Image (tube, rainbow, N blue to C red):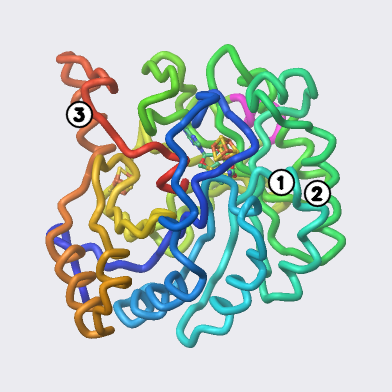
Amino acid sequence: MLLDTLQRPVKDLRISVTDRCNFRCTYCMPLDNYDWLDKSEVLTFEEITRLARLFIQLGVEKIRLTGGEPLARRDLEQLVKSLSGLDGLRDLCLTTNGSTLAEKAQALKAAGLRRLNVSLDSLKPDRFRRITKRGDLQKVLHGLFVAKEHGFSPIKLNAVIERGVNDDEIIDLVTFSLEHGFAIRFIEFMDVGNANHWQSDTIVPKQEILDIINTRFPLREVGRKGGSAPSVDYQCVDGSGDIGVIASVTEPFCSSCTRARLTADGRLVTCLFANTGHNLKVLLRGGASDDRLLDVLQQVWLQRTDRYSEERLAALRSGAGYDPKEHKKIEMISLGG
Ligand code: SAM
Ligand code: SF4
Ligand code: SF4
């Protein structure tokens, strides 16, 4: 089995299919102007599928399509179709802001996609617009219900909780998820990229999120799916619901991190907080054989040492302080969440 320097296998591949997005979420990509990739720089569906097949040979079982906004990539269902047919792939999913899901759900389902994550940070239209800067809550909710009608299961809501922004909606979001049969994952606000205004006191720690939920919906812990999922999951004590918290800041899970990331322009990145990646596109377009590509993928993974969130927590606890601006990172919109 292929293991990195910390004995972690590669099991998950997150593929960013575009760096474009129609939202400008304040916690992710608040900038109006950005140095967007030229179309010619973006991997084709054939290139992505070829790399995905090679990653599966190395142990990848699960692929998540992300971005940017993956549904902004034209004809995405064609990629879904190619990937869903790959031997050895056990799970294919997509993370979307949901804004065009209503129009695309049927084609995605027909192409073989079974499950979805949809970002939803607020149920208040004005606040939703403030957070996303461009989003229309009604369109996202409509997309969710259309996806549900088409039989996607599970549909998971992702909510980034920020102090003073939407921490008063935790109970409402859980209530909404329970009422409509959606799973929900609360995500601690992270210092991804360089453009958000992260400070350690703007995060709402996992324990505080759980304490709030427990006041109304007493929970029991189910644990991390497969032992290595980012989310610690819970159910209501009556067995209903699927509620999780992704505590990257306060309870980092680097020791079980089996995720590789492929940027839209074909860089292999081994950590969400990396400042650089390995350029696979130049190999793909330079005529490299599968064996050569496999060799490079293996070398990159064998040398992987990443444990950024554990290091961040150690710095936060040491009293020496942690300034995210001292660490230049690839933007989340390029990297994929
Ligand atoms: N555009 C799609 C979406 O919003 O779902 C997919 C890409 S987005 C980068 C993937 C996930 O990253 C989203 O669920 C988003 O909420 C999350 N995310 C972005 N910035 C974050 C941050 N600073 N902290 C925590 N999660 C973040
Ligand atoms: Fe928001 Fe997703 Fe776009 Fe980032 S990529 S700005 S999280 S919609
Ligand atoms: Fe994985 Fe990096 Fe996140 Fe740690 S900080 S869990 S190594 S992506």
The structure residue drawn at horizontal position 30% and vertical position 58%, both measured from the top left corner, is: 268
Q: What amino acid type should be assigned to the residue bearing mark 2?
A: Gly
Q: Decide: is 107 above or below 34.
A: below
Element type at mark 2: helix
Sequence order check: which comes first, mark 2 or mark 1?
1
Question: Residue 337: image x %, image y %?
Answer: 47, 46
Sequence order check: which comes first, mark 1 or mark 3?
1
Residues under numbered marks 2 and 1 in contact, where contact means CB atoms less than 8 Å apart: yes
Q: What amino acid type should be assigned to the residue bearing mark 3?
A: Ala
Nearer to us: label 3 or label 2: 2
Sequence order check: which comes first, mark 3 or mark 2?
2
Q: Is mark 3 within 8 Å of ligand 3?
A: no
Give the label on residue 98, or none: 1
The structure residue drawn at horizontal position 46% and vertical position 16%, both measured from the top left corner, is: 202
The structure residue drawn at horizontal position 30% and vertical position 40%, both measured from the top left corner, is: 273
Q: Which residue is mark 3?
A: 314
